[in-house]
């Protein structure tokens, strides 16, 4: 089908009959916001952007696409980081935006469940839960614009995985439009159901390559009664690991967040982000942002924390530590953590690596990899921070200070990324802990995944989407 | 292939070359324990029972079976309740027992992970974790003999699902021998990994129909510091639901167990199980067994509990309540709950239904279904108990008191089960919450699952096991 052809005109007319005139966008200027990666790094070229308003309309569009041999790129908030939600090949696919599927269909506060349509923003869902004194714990930087359909399709992580798990762990059921245009409905919100294969698991994390998630039943949780936020200073990642273990033993599931921040990150933030200031009188190699969300009163938890912190100091594990005494102070601690990406961007270009290794191997991984980098690319600066409690580090590298005249043998940027991902592989880790594959990391898939794993994935892709029309060029 | 044929002899010789002479059992008497459902309800007829000692040997056996066109019934502890681990068709399959795959390969107490081979008993894994002061929270009646491979293949539930989830939620990775005889190894124990489809999810809960789980990385947890066990008396399931919600709000993740026990169950236990006695001075319609496992000291949690209980009594939600003051008393409370099945068996035959409905609809479900039963089958007695916190009830029915001369129109046993499962279906529930499908519930699958769901399952089965050699006659 080519743009302007009769077939194309027929197809568009049929789409318009389903969704309404104004919800099938073909105007180049109007399409652009949907076709562009949100940081402007790449732009796709879609046949049209189609915005169905109901699951039934999604199914109708999928069947039209199937009959016309048009591919579909499902898109939520278009906030992904791996080019998963824009077309790869030009003029072969529509973008199917879920943004009009934005109702919270049901909220069951006794059953602790909420049914949301795929296009609901994460923030809207958090808000709906909070209104009935419930918590939907998924929390991400892009929560104001990312959608739950995208969160599910990428199995998003975020800052409370240590306590609540990834998005997959927060889902009790899905409604999906299959590649065949059928509607699979499993939205009863059961906590236990062992009647055959657990179909939702196939679609979660599949980045829209097996079907289109149109709605989900999500788990809600009681709202914790107290929150204690502490910023800790430690001399090494080994000490941080030790503290992670002890904090888990002490606080159990109340330990909600355990974020590692290397000194370089703190320096960047203090330098580039207005309104931030150092918490400790002197710099330390690492800081830890730790949060406890408890069901006992704050005063009780704070008292337990103070005892615990004293013990850490006496055991020489902790150099210094501050428990936030106000919401404002807790927010300031969080700002230090959350401004790292912005500070890095202001400091100049850097190579990003969203990696995971087994939690207990993080110190060894950091030490070995920094050592390798300093010998193979002198001057490269590691900006290491992230969700240590989950084994997930943003192990970013700035190569701006590499003096190519002095060190002509130094690895180029691609070589640096390869070195890091090879290291991750040696440590049994993941080259994409929370961002997914999209179109961007397919080469890494081929490099690091076993042939057995890839052939199983291909077999299931072939089984569920034999025509290859669901988000082609992504993952596989 | 028929027993005694040349082909059969060659096949057995090849299996013996892989596993060793004594680990390929063909003797009728020796085979019997593997071929029989553990309660003696059915017996299969296997070509042989093969006991490989390593993943490599499993893969070799699978390839031999593939080449000889012999089906495979994987078997762990053979403790299932739905005929999932014995052959259906005679003389067409081997039983592949995992019981020699029984090593704990690795224990990482910093990373809170344990790698166990499929044939490890659940009790052995709990024990290995406890030895390093860690908790593996899965707990089932059959834990002394069931294996983790079976637990994973059936996505087993148990008594701590409310806090820790089903077996699926306790697994970070698998090693699997595919139907093709290849080995898929994903045992690094990452907490986050979004590199393509999450393959382990396909094999968990698949009852051995897509491949053979040979090892798994399991999540460990810190050991709670205190445990409070209470037995509560309530006037209605509505009150129980209300208390469930308030207890969740009060204790958050510390609320570990919330079991509902109807008066009939209590009466049966007191009547048939020696050494049990009533906790309350008078009988109540329902009792609740509630457990809080906390990281604060027992005295603190007990004090919070006493306050909470007083509030429930003042709100007229709670008729009476006793907090166990000793381990012996807590054990006595648990015995009341855990003896129900035995007491029922002693009282005579009953129809078992392992059902789930949305948690918030349990009171309505019980009321409506009891009402329907009493009108359609007067004299039928409901023995209702189970994991109310998970929406999972064992809604069993004794029809012994039905007087067929008085009520000739009363439903027969099959009709009773159909009535209950139809009710479950109307409530959006599950006809098999924690036991799976096996060979026993395939008819229910066809009746209650949507055609879309079934066709997706069949497509994936076809993709991963095109020859249909993995546990044929189970699930689909």
Image (cartoon, coloured by chain):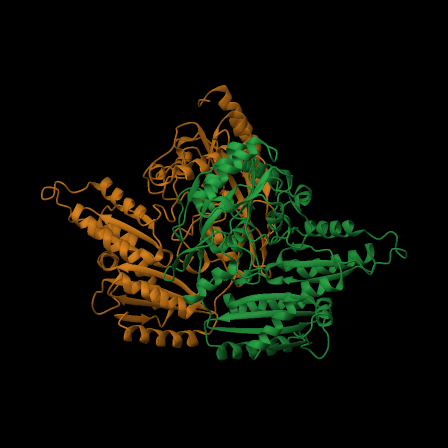
Chain colours: A green, B orange
**Rendering coords of residue A381 (x, y %):** 77, 61
**Rendering coords of residue B5 (x, y %):** 47, 20
B258 and A188: which is toward the camera: A188
B286 and A443: which is toward the camera: A443
**The C terminus of chain B, quarter of image:** top left
**Rendering coords of residue A116 (x, y %):** 45, 54
- Please identify the residue farthest to the top as the structure is shown: B6
- Please identify the residue farthest to the left as the structure is shown: B406
**Is residue B56 among the parts visible in the rendering?**
no
B28 and A33: which is toward the camera: A33
Left or right: A208 as drawn, with respect to B269: right
Left or right: A121 as drawn, with respect to A374: left
Residue drawn at (46%, 77%), measured in percent from left and top?
A: A297
**Rendering coords of residue B436 (x, y %):** 39, 44
Residue drawn at (37%, 73%), measured in percent from left and top?
A: B305
A272 and A333: which is toward the camera: A272
In the displayed structure, would residue A250 be above or below residue A389?
below
């Amino acid at each position: 089908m080519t743009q302007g052809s009769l077939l194309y005109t027929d197809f568009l007319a049929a789409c318009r009959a389903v969704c309404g005139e104004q919800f099938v966008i073909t105007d180049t200027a109007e399409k652009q916001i949907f076709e562009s990666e949100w940081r402007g790094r790449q732009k796709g070229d879609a046949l049209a952007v189609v915005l169905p308003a109901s699951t039934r309309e999604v199914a109708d569009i999928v069947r039209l696409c199937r009959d016309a041999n048009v591919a579909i790129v499902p898109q939520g908030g278009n906030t992904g980081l791996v080019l998963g939600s824009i077309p790869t090949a030009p003029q072969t696919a529509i973008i199917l935006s879920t943004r009009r599927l934005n109702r919270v269909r049901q909220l069951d506060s006794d059953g602790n469940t909420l049914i949301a349509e795929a296009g609901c923003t994460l923030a809207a869902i958090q808000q709906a839960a909070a209104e009935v004194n419930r918590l939907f714990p998924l929390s991400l930087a892009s929560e104001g614009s990312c959608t739950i359909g995208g969160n599910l399709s990428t199995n998003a992580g975020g800052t409370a995985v240590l306590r609540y798990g990834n998005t997959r762990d927060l889902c009790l059921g899905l409604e999906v439009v299959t590649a065949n245009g059928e509607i699979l409905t499993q939205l009863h919100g059961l906590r236990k159901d062992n009647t055959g294969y657990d179909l939702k698991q196939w679609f979660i994390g599949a980045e829209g390559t097996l079907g289109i998630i149109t709605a989900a039943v999500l788990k809600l949780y009681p709202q914790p009664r107290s929150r204690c936020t502490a910023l800790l200073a430690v001399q090494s990642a080994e000490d941080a690991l030790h503290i992670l273990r002890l904090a888990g033993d002490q606080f159990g599931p109340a330990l909600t967040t355990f974020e590692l921040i290397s000194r370089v990150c703190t320096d960047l933030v203090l330098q580039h982000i207005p309104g931030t200031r150092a918490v400790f009188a002197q710099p330390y190699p690492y800081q830890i942002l730790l949060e406890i969300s408890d069901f006992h009163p704050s005063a009780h938890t704070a008292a337990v924390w103070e005892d615990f912190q004293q013990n850490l100091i006496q055991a020489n594990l902790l150099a210094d530590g501050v428990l936030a005494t106000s919401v404002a102070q807790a927010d300031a601690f969080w700002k230090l953590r959350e401004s790292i990406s912005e500070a890095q961007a202001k400091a100049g270009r850097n190579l990003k690596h969203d990696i995971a290794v087994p939690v207990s191997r993080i110190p060894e991984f950091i030490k070995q990899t920094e050592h390798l980098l300093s010998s193979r690319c002198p001057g490269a600066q590691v900006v290491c921070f992230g969700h240590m409690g989950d084994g997930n580090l943003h192990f970013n590298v700035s190569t701006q200070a590499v003096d190519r005249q002095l060190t002509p043998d130094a690895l180029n940027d691609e070589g640096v990324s390869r070195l890091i991902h090879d290291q991750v592989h040696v440590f049994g880790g993941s080259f994409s802990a929370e961002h997914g594959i999209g179109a961007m990391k397919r080469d890494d898939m081929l490099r690091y995944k076993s042939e057995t794993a890839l052939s199983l994935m291909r077999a299931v892709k072939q089984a569920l989407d034999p025509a290859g029309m669901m988000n082609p060029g992504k993952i596989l």
